[in-house]
Amino acid sequence: MTQKIDAGAKLAVPGSKMGGRWHGMHYAWIIAAVTFLTLLTTAGIRSTPGILIVPLEHEFGWSRATISVAVSVNLLLYGLMGPFAAAFFDKIGARRTMAIALCLLAAGVGATTFMTKPWHMILIWGVVVGCGAGMTAFSLSATVVNRWFRKSQGTVMGVLTASAATGQLLFLPLLASLSHHHGWRTAALSIACAALVVLPLVLFFMRNYPSSVGLRPYGESNSEPQNVVAAAAPSATNPFRTALMGLQRGLRSRDFWLLAGSFFICGASTNGLIGTHLIPACVDHGIPEVRAAGLMAVMGILDLIGTTFSGWLSDRYNSRYLLCWYYGLRGLSLLGLPFALSGPEWGLSAFAIFYGLDWVATVPPTVRLTADAFGRENVGVMFGWIFASHQIGAALAATFAGTVRTYLGDYIIAFLLSGTICLLAAGLVLRINKSRQPELVDELGVVPQQG
């Protein structure tokens, strides 16, 4: 159901005098900027466990395996919330959903300063922070890009995806320094305040659709009269039913299983393993925590470059071949990590460069393949489920690596196994959208496009 609005009418665009534009700039770029800042802050919060593991071990005597359980719950819920969040974007709007998420994150991270038992960490960090972070997962990026952009979708998706690296770049060294000099509680409170700083920007600037400000998506041709723009009405469908319908559709699709399986491996080899355990692994090898956090920040800079470039490439080249290269190179870098940690200093720097450029470069081509397989209208929910598999892989890898470290004394087995399955993923992705026939229109209402 749609309604029509006059594009020349006075619209609620802060600071605008040009009917849906920000001083001549298409408002899609303002939306992208606000989304980037939100994802950047969420990424900073999600990177915090890497600097908390060692301080929590020292203060409470908790084992690394015990702490990893809370991190795994966080990672799991971060992924599982994605498809439901995408449905809520349709039901109550992206702005309200993002605002709720930031409030949950600020409250949850702040509450961690009061925890004294392992179950406190599982409840607060695992459940509350995990749900808050999941409401601003990559499904938000996919939804914003597909609603607001017709041109340069891959490039914009690459930049938004790179916010994870930029958040790490900005927050990790600062948080590590605060934790080292003032205690981990000060670091936690600082990152909670960052979420509260972003909240007013979301409330003031964020809009749900281009039609809300009298515009078409950026890059879409003006095929209709200039004074008439269709405004999307909120979905009347229950968001939980919408999300579950998407899962039902995906389970019947071979492409969904290939996308979800390869993204499972992606999560296991990034957030679950490196994002959670690289800093503790460095400490095990005599590398100070602050220096290790600096290494992660360097990887963040490189990932910002690599993921943005990956988005640009996905606008121009076959996404299956891009993913094959990305997973293959990541696998080789992980196979070499044990030798980099125990070898000369330049070895770890080489790993940071090689792995950093590839960290989340997989996201833009995966989103494009998802849109090709299931239609642009469904990309938020469908990619939400694919991303859920990413986080299931991350959660299992975080627990597995922590358990390996606790009982074997090092991470070698975890690193080598992760590198091996990445090489497996490099072969799987070549089969995505390879020989698919048109499907019948299902309950989501879209006939998938040909790949």
Image: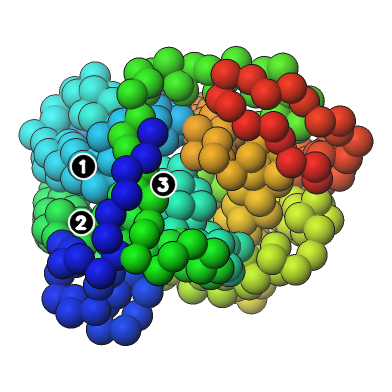
The residue that appears at 19% across and 24% down in the rendered structure is 120
Residue 345: give x, y in percent of width and height: 60, 73
Judging by the rendered image, the residue that carries numbered circle 3 is: 140
Res. 180 visible in picture = no
Q: Nearer the viewer, residue 355 or 197?
A: 197
Name the N-terminal-most of marks 3 and 2: 3
Secondary structure at numbered mark 2: helix
Find the residue positioned furthest to the bottom.
24
Spatial separation of the CA atoms under disc 2 and disc 1: 9 Å
Residue 105 lies in quadrant: top left
User: Disc number at residue 96?
Assistant: 1
Q: Is residue 179 above or below residue 353?
A: above
Residue situated in front as seen by the camera: 208 or 320? 208
Q: Whole-Å distance between the Cαs marked 3 and 1?
A: 12 Å
Tell me where residue 24 appears, x and y as whole percent.
32, 84
> Which comes before the other along the chain, label 3 or label 1?
1
Residue 429's x, y, as percent?
A: 80, 42
Q: Quadrant of residue 106?
A: top left
Q: Decide if residue 108 is on the left or right side of residue 241.
A: left
Give, as a three-letter code, the residue at label 1.
Arg
- Determine the CA span between mark 3 and mark 2: 13 Å
Kindly tell me whether residue 24 is visible in this rendering. Answer: yes
The residue at which mark 2 appears reads as 202
